[in-house]
Amino acid sequence: MRVSDMDVNVNGGKAVAKFRQAYSADSLNVTSRKTLELVKTGDRWSIVRESTGG
């Protein structure tokens, strides 16, 4: 798996990470845009939503 074009925006205890993911295994080759929405609880970040595309 490779990640490129990473963009992260943090606003207080919330963050949005957008990136391009390239994944390959056997005969499967997939490249897609991913968006992760994160929330900070204490000193840990947790993913609350993940979407593909866009």
Image (cartoon, rainbow, N blue to C red):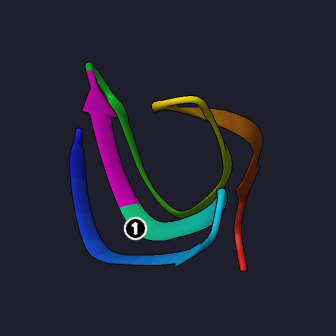
Res. 47 image quadrant: top right
Q: Which residues are magenta?
A: 21-25
Q: Is residue 46 above or below residue 39?
A: above
Residue at horizontal 46 percent and vertical 31 percent from the top: 43
The picture places residue 53, in percent across and down from the top left corner, at 70, 69
Q: Taking 48 as reference, is 3 left or right?
A: left
Q: Element at badge 1?
A: strand
Res. 15 image quadrant: bottom right
Residue at horizontal 28 percent and vertical 23 percent from the top: 25
Q: Which residue is mark 1?
A: 20
Label 1: few (<14), some (14–19) or many (≥20) C-alpha neighbours in 10 Å? some
Q: In front: 20, or 12?
A: 12
Q: In front: 52, or 30?
A: 52
Q: Amino acid at mark 1?
A: Arg
Q: Is residue 5 above or below residue 1?
A: below
Q: Is residue 38 above or below residue 6?
A: above
